[in-house]
Image (spheres, rainbow, N blue to C red):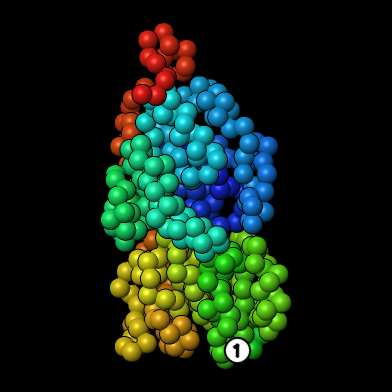
Amino acid sequence: MKILIVSDAWFPQVNGVVRTLDTIRREVEKLGHVVQMITPDQFFTFPCPTYPEIRLAFFQKSTIAREIDRFRPHAIHIATEGPLGQAARRVCMRRDLPFTTAYHTRFPEYVYARFRIPLALTYRLMRRFHAPSKGIMVATDSIRRDLENRGFAACVSLSRGVDVSLFKPGPKGLLDDERPISLYVGRVAVEKNLDAFLSLDLKGTKCVVGDGPSLETMRQKYPDVRFLGAKHGEELAAIYAAADVFVFPSLTDTFGLVLLEALACGLPIAAYPVTGPKDVLAGHYCTADKPDTNTVACLDDDLKRAVEIALTLSPERCVAYARTFSWEHVAQQFVDNLALVREPSSDPVPTVEEEERGGVSFERA
């Protein structure tokens, strides 16, 4: 099957969406399918307001239409709701081409955190974007239920995985700070609720790995915190392994890929009891009032107590739990979801010229 994926999130951005899409692409290709990406690096771009690390693409629609004609995919997947996603959606609707979408990010909550735009308004825009989709791929059951309660239809599951050949336990000596070392990995941005972690009175050292629009503000506000910047690959895995506990203060993530990476490196998790951590950990966590050393995380509204309890949990148990997540399974899920649009044996989508010869009108009703 020939699969076209359109995404506004792509390298050199470093986030869970990019890593998820890149890994799915590679695993789907291992299954024998052909994947073509349409991403911002193929266009003239401008920096996203308030988030210059993210580049937004100009002049997308005609290029996307030409790429569909050239590649003739069996299935089209629109991974994001940004300018490229919007342009791809318009092309597909104008030409009556079926497509799937994904809900990777709690965009309404992020917009509210930055600009205080009411959630109801942004969710209405999100519903409109996803309404024509034959399948909205979501990471967890709780996100699926939440979206369905908000009027989204055709939600289907697309889980996440972890590369245990890269993320695995290792020596602690890479970080020689006072222990215990409490680690956060991810964007340094207001929507990640980092203040809730960095303001805690914890023993040892707090370390932050990542970049983002709030980095310099956080450096000045928390001079005792070690900010290590963005890290990748083996260097990132080694930092995970060298820490003692992973702290995840976000209240808005749809999944939290970093949770699996931390667990695979032997780090117990401390987080709030919210969507994302609760789904990833699927009952393998305890609370501050009921500590349980047979778990791999402590989720509690008292984040300091969650950190203290997480430090008592077994690293070996964390590794064993992370190994139950497979990217191969996720890739097969993705391919199966595309069958909602078009069976792999179907003909590829026709070109504009072919549709015109068949008397098909591209004008929307």
In the rendered view of the protein, which quadrant contains the N terminus? Answer: top left
Determine whether 21 is above or below 119 in the image: above
**Lateral position of residue 38 relative to residue 1, left or right:** right
**Lateral position of residue 134 relative to residue 175, left or right:** left
Q: Secondary structure at mark 1?
A: loop
Q: Quadrant of residue 234?
A: bottom right
From the viewer's side, name the closer residue of 113 and 135: 113
In the rendered view of the protein, which quadrant contains the C terminus? Answer: top left
From the viewer's side, name the closer residue of 41 and 175: 41
Please state which amino acid type lies under the numbered disc 1.
Gly
From the viewer's side, name the closer residue of 261 and 45: 45
Residue 159: give x, y in percent of width and height. 37, 55
Q: Residue at x 48, y 45 (%)?
A: 81
Q: Residue at x 33, y 31 (%)?
A: 342
Residue 253: give x, y in percent of width and height. 45, 63
Q: Determine crowd level at label 1: few under 14, some 14-19, many 20+ residues with C-alpha closer than 10 A.
A: few
Determine whether 258 is above or below 297 in the image: above
From the viewer's side, name the closer residue of 178 and 188: 188
Q: Residue at x 64, y 67 (%)?
A: 214
Give the residue furthest to the top: 357
Q: Residue at x 43, y 25 (%)?
A: 94
Residue 48: give x, y in percent of width and height. 63, 50
Q: Is residue 110 visible?
A: no
- Residue underneath mark 1: 204
